[in-house]
Amino acid sequence: MEFPSNRFRGNSDASTGLIFIRVYNKWHTVIKSELRKIGITHPQFVVMTVLNFLGQSEDFVSQASIAKMADMDVMSVSQILRGLEANGYLTREANPRDTRANAVRLLDRGREAIRLALPIVEKIDDDFFGALSGDEKAFRDFLHRLA
């Protein structure tokens, strides 16, 4: 059967999308494996880390602000929050500034998970993206441009 792409028929390495997803999957496999040891998933880590970051400057962090910063669907964030709340990582309470929204707050178990996970993820990033050496900033700039 003939491959229907005129651009990549003879050279899959010419596909930026394929290279990108292969690199992402390689990085993500390591992240998932290490976070599993702590008992959380990567999406849970992202949500709790964003919540922790936003909590530095906001008294009442909303589900919508977590979704916006993480660039995630609000319903996906809601499901992740529900699971984290059921497992004692965080709480959702009425937001005194907006009755339509909940204020999300990390509990001790959530702060401990982030305290353990963040250095691990940062080391994985350092090791993985360290292969770019002096080009890492340019790579980040390209990613920002695409985002």
Image (cartoon, grey):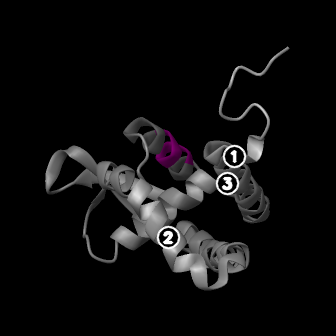
User: On the image, numbered disc 3 is attached to which residue?
Assistant: 24
Which span of residues is magenta-colored? 79-83
Secondary structure type for disc 3: helix
Q: Are marks 2 and 3 in contact (CB under 8 Å)?
A: no
Q: Closer to the camera: disc 2 or disc 3?
A: 2
Q: Could you say which is closer to the camera, residue 113 or residue 1? A: 1
Question: In the picture shown, does residue 31 fall above or below 132?
Answer: above
Q: Is residue 88 left or right of residue 72?
A: right
Answer with the quarter of the image where residue 1 lies: top right
Given the image, on which type of amino acid does mark 2 rest?
Answer: Arg
Residue 72 image offset from top left, x and y in percent = 43, 46
Secondary structure type for disc 2: helix
Q: Earlier in the sequence, mark 3 or mark 1?
A: 1
Q: Residue furthest bottom?
A: 134
Q: Residue at the location (27% across, 76% down)? A: 57
Answer with the quarter of the image where residue 35 lies: bottom right
Q: Earlier in the sequence, mark 2 or mark 3?
A: 3
User: On the image, numbered disc 2 is attached to which residue?
Assistant: 140
Q: Closer to the camera: disc 1 or disc 2?
A: 1
